[in-house]
Amino acid sequence: MLVEQEIIARFCEAGHLVDPAVVSYLRERGDPALISGILAGIQEDCAVILPSHIPSLSPHRDGIRFTADPRLEVVEGMEGSAGPVRQIEDYVSLFRNRYDCLGSLIRKRSGAIPIEALTHSSRFRDSEVTVIGIVIDVKSTAKGHRILELEDPTGTMPVLFNNGRDGFSDAERIVPDEVIGVRGKPSPEGKLFYADQLFRPDVPVQHAPYTPKNSGKVALISDIHIGSDTFLREPWERFCDWLSAADDISYLLVAGDLVDGIGIYPGQEKELTIPNIYEQYDRLGEMLSTLPSELRIVLAPGNHDVVRGAEPQPVIPPEFRSQYPKNCTFVENPAVVSIHGARVLMYHGRSIDDLIGMIPGARYEAPAEMMEAMLKRRHLAPTYGRRTPVLATNKDRLLIDTVPEILHTGHVHISGISRYRGVLAVNAGAWQSQTAFQKQMNINPTPGQAIIVDLERMEPEVYDFLS
Ligand code: D5M
Ligand code: FE
Ligand code: ZN
């Protein structure tokens, strides 16, 4: 086994800094000879050792490109794919599908044995092994260690992470219902598993995002909240004027909460300037009609929209779409759109509220950190049964199956940008000023911003239209 400090020290002695992704790769492999191999192949003046310096990790380009023409294609979450509400038994299939998909991502990096092989036989009692399971429950002990119940298709087992161990801060971030792998040793009677190391499905270290050529720019926004008395009409108009003149922006993506809706919270009617749900959608349609007809607009729903709240949320139904121009495409929440082959995973982001409540140190002011948490877990809403309602479906639609080039969310009304292992994460703020509720909760929005991404360079820029 290799511990973090040891790896950093080896590179430091040789005069190099080392990227955290390389450290976690080397810890997983646990082979000190790999470090010597990397050092042998590196130039002396190389300041930071990156994943690209690891000989066995050449950039991985999967070659899946959807089309060049039409340039925008809905890959997942097209109208009609969300399906109806089904029966309670389907939750078994949902979690089985989650375990199979995410477990196989972990298994690619570390062979694992069934939990039953530990609890029912003494064969592995003295060896270091890996098990993969869904976290059924997780809590801290009186002494500050982390204990969790891990379940795979063969059984369950309590797993202990000692707070004195290397990498304990990752273990503190374990949330219920995520799929993890743990390497360690069972106790002599086989009743408890002492974990040394945690594996998440994660984005591969060697992931190389695709960057399309001559593809222009995309504007990422969210949470317009038409109909609310806090909708910011003037900044919105300034944005529309600017967008109409910006002829290198070919796409506008909206990640949900298109309108404020009706009956979303008690007393909402007092905060509405348009109390009719049809009129709210019509108003937005009229506003979008003023934008250039060549702009491709993609509209996904959020928790304020007219469709069911359980995710995946279906597209806004046709009876609300009569005022929308032809260049609008309605998608589900979540959805994947491919722009010139660059994949944008759009998700409203309701689970960010849940993640902030569970992950130590998480803050509303840094929503992009929660997007990283989603990417590491390869899941948009890992924890079931809190504030994010999830529908029983055969296939877990909230899995991050294919790694996107861009992850685009909203919901918390605070913008944030981050890059994680080549994936650009953008939380796109809102067009609504602070509501009475947010004031009570001490949530300070950053409204009136659009995040523009140059797809060829994959570089984001924030434009502020508030004043
Ligand atoms: O959510 C905007 C933000 O405000 C989001 O972070 C949740 C928080 N919010 C808003 N209303 C509530 C209630 N009733 N409970 C808890 N948190 C809330 P939006 O989806 O735009 O309402
Ligand atoms: Fe919102
Ligand atoms: Zn929302």
Image (cartoon, helix red, strand yellow):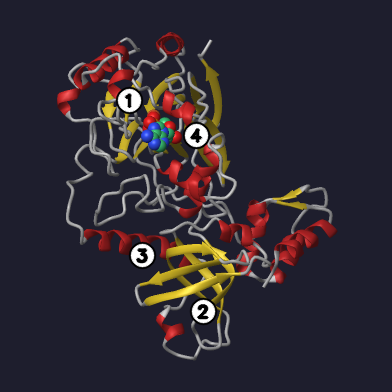
**x%, y% of residue 315?**
24, 34
CA gap, disc 3 to disc 4?
Answer: 28 Å
Q: Quick one: label 3 or label 4, which is nearer the N terminus?
A: 3
Q: Callout 2: helix, strand or loop?
A: loop
Percent of width and height locating residue 26:
65, 63
CA distance separating discs 1 and 4: 18 Å
Left or right, 219 with reference to 225: right
* Above-or-below relation of 35 to 192: above
Badge 4 is on which residue? 426
The amino acid marked with disc number 2 is Leu
Tell me the quarter of the picture where residue 328 sits.
Answer: top left
Q: Which mark is residue 258?
A: 1
Mark 1 or mark 3, earlier in chain: 3
Tell me the CA gap for discs 3 and 2. 24 Å
Label 3 CA crowd tier, 10 Å (few <14, some 14–19, many 20+) = some
Q: Tell me which numbered mark, 1 or 4, is placed earlier along the sequence.
A: 1
Give the residue number, with chain letter if any, for mark 3.
Answer: 100
> Secondary structure under badge 4?
strand
The numbered mark, 2 or 1, whose residue comes first in the sequence reads: 2
Q: Is residue 188 left or right of residue 222?
A: right
